[in-house]
Image (spheres, helix red, strand yellow):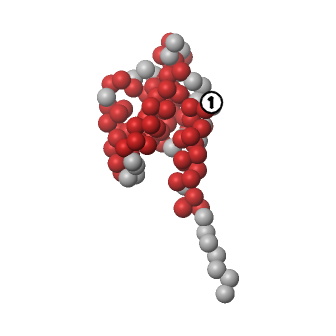
Amino acid sequence: MWNKVSSGMHDRETYHQEGLGYNLNEAQAEVFASARMGEVWSGETREKWNAYAESQNMDPELRDGMFKALTQAGLHDDGSGGQLADIRMVNVGSSTDDVMVIRHNN
């Protein structure tokens, strides 16, 4: 049974923060929270996700795979399992440009 049954105990922001706690970025945490709340089927979540993916020049296959994994984790998983492991690895790999510095010793 999906998490909608228990979503009455928490609000969207709580689930968004939960997603951030799993090292998801803002857009990923939004999809995760929508799934937790049972709102992922509205179409709005998918539209926002597609816009985010386009802004990141994300490959359509990666975009769709991430969306599926995020919704499945939100609907059925506690987020800490394997469903989010690949996404966390992509996040780590895509953020290395921001933190990696190559020094030249002359």
Mark 1, residue position? 81
Q: Position of residue 62 (x, y in %)?
A: 43, 43
Q: Position of residue 38 (x, y in %)?
A: 43, 20
Residue drawn at (56%, 40%), measured in percent from left and top? 86
Q: Position of residue 105 (x, y in %)?
A: 68, 82
Give the image quarter of residue 77. Answer: top right
Q: Position of residue 8 (x, y in %)?
A: 50, 15
Mark yes or no: residue 17 visible: no
Above or below residue 21? Residue 4 is above
- How many numbered discs sit on the rendered protein? 1
Residue that extends furthest to the right in the rendered view of this protein? 105
Q: Nearer the viewer, residue 11 or 23?
A: 23
Residue drawn at (46%, 28%), measured in percent from left and top? 71
- Mark 1 closeness class: few <14, some 14–19, many ≥20 residues within 10 Å: few
Q: Locate the C terminus by quadrant.
A: bottom right
Residue drawn at (60%, 25%), measured in percent from left and top? 78
Query: In the picture provided, is 48 more to the left or to the right than 29?
Result: left
Mark yes or no: residue 71 visible: yes
Q: Nearer the viewer, residue 13 or 25?
A: 25
Q: Nearer the viewer, residue 14 or 47?
A: 47
What residue type is disc 1 on? Gly
Above or below residue 66? Residue 76 is above
Give the image quarter of residue 20. Answer: top right
Query: In the picture provided, is 70 more to the left or to the right than 53?
Result: right
Residue that extends furthest to the front in the rendered view of this protein? 61
